[in-house]
Amino acid sequence: MGKAAGAGVQLDVGARFGAARRRTLALCEPLTAEDMMVQSCPEASPAKWHLAHTAWFFESFVLREFLPDYRLFNPDFQWLFNSYYETFSVFPEKRLRASFSRPALGEVLRYREHVDEGVERLLEGDPEPEALKRIELGVNHEEQHQELLLTDILHAFFTNPLRPKYREQGNEGTGEQESNAALHNPVLRFQEFEGGLREIGRRGEGFCFDNELPRHRVCLEPYALGDRLVTCGEYAEFMADGGYRRPEFWLSAGWAAVQAAGWNAPLYWTRENGDWSVFTLCGSLPLEKLRTTPVSQVSFYEADAYARWAWRRLPTEFEWEAATEGQPVEGNLLDSGWLRPVSTSLLQNRRLTPWGDCWEWTASAYLGYPGFRPLEGALGEYNGKFMSGQMVLRGGSCVTPKAHIRASYRNFFAPETRWQFSGIRLAT
């Protein structure tokens, strides 16, 4: 890499770092200090913890190693805000994060400022290429936590009996245009794709996570994908047909989850006086106004059961990637400002639209690609250690930053997970 090229990369990384750090703080602006303490389910974390942990990542994997005169903000933070890196330090149980009343929010914000100053000093000098790679990894890590922060606060507000709103209706509102669109659900069409030998995994230059590599070949049979996601109205038909009461549609583990947890609808659906409503970051909205919006907050088990009921199936992650590689990333992502899935009737382009609204469950287990090698050291625990008992999701959601997503991106969660913005695309 020449000096001029290196300087350009340094400027790009610095700009992305600053933008990501500012956005995280902006996402917290509607929250009170009390809101930021809540951890409402074992999968979630308090917003204050997200603020601290993302600073911890830069301090632990960038500043400690590449800024010679860096001074730790607080030595206890090295283990207190470690998430799961066993080879780095001990760490508290995840379920205890809501008990961290100290450090106070003000001290966490000062911690972020301290870390920001350190990274800025590092970028003002002549950082090693590895340092720039680590900063870029930290930025992508922070973007993941921006999505998690919104996902977690949605669950926290849903469990609050007052059902508070994260914010009032804005661009994300259910205006007349969308209300009218709710009456006109587009027919689900299937776009056909040729089979054959295809290459899968990150191609070319640019950032990617280790689980997107190495690029390799897979053989696909001819297949077809739905040109839009399954909607709330369509999912309501599955429910009305006894979907949650008929074991023939469910995998054994899925049926056990239905019985154990008492599932009878997606996570944020509630029924009062016979009418369903859906809780969103902008409060509860009537299902009747959302019938053409993609159904969200369903588990892999629910997605698979719906597909069986509809005499379809879920796509594999390889089919999904082969169909979407090369398409521009355009859709209802965090940058659009809706903060929830929006009506399929508002889509101007009826070709396959893979980006945004909901992460799409695939039929693929989360495993390493042939020849997969995790990053060296503690960072090798970022993805590789979770390659067991998880399913892959693709495409990004309404709270995924646009700059964060690409065709080769692999998200993954346990099949019973429901608190994420996860939805359903059918395949044949």
Image (cartoon, rainbow, N blue to C red):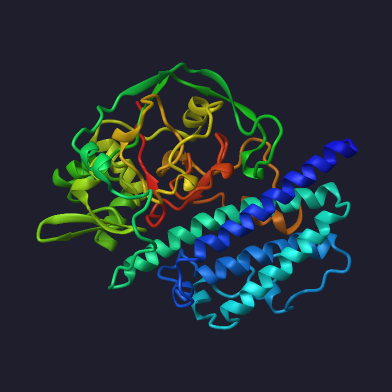
Residue 152 place in picture, x, y as percent: 44, 63
Which residue is situated farthest in the bottom direction here? Answer: 102
In the rendered structure, the answer to whether residue 133 lies left or right of residue 172 reads: right
The C terminus, quarter of image? top left
Q: Residue at x 18, y 36 (%)?
A: 183
The quadrant in which the N terminus is found is top right
Query: In the picture provided, is 323 more to the left or to the right than 199?
Result: left
Closest to the observer: 350 or 371? 350
- Residue at 64% in and 68% down: 82
Label count reads 0
Q: Which residue is painted at 43% across and 47% down in the image?
A: 398
- From this viewpoint, is residue 85 visible? no
Q: Is residue 128 visible?
A: yes
Q: Write the residue at 39% across / 57% down.
A: 419
Q: Position of residue 305 (x, y in %)?
A: 28, 42
**Picture coordinates of residue 57 (x, y %)?**
68, 62
Task: State the residue in front, 229 or 260.
Answer: 229
Viewed as shown, does residue 21 lie left or right of 363?
right
**Quadrant of the rendered image containing residue 25:** bottom right
Q: Position of residue 373 (x, y in %)?
A: 70, 43
Residue 314 to residue 246: above or below: above
Rendering quarter of residue 118:
bottom right
- Judging depth in this view, the residue of 401 and 322 nearest the camera is 401
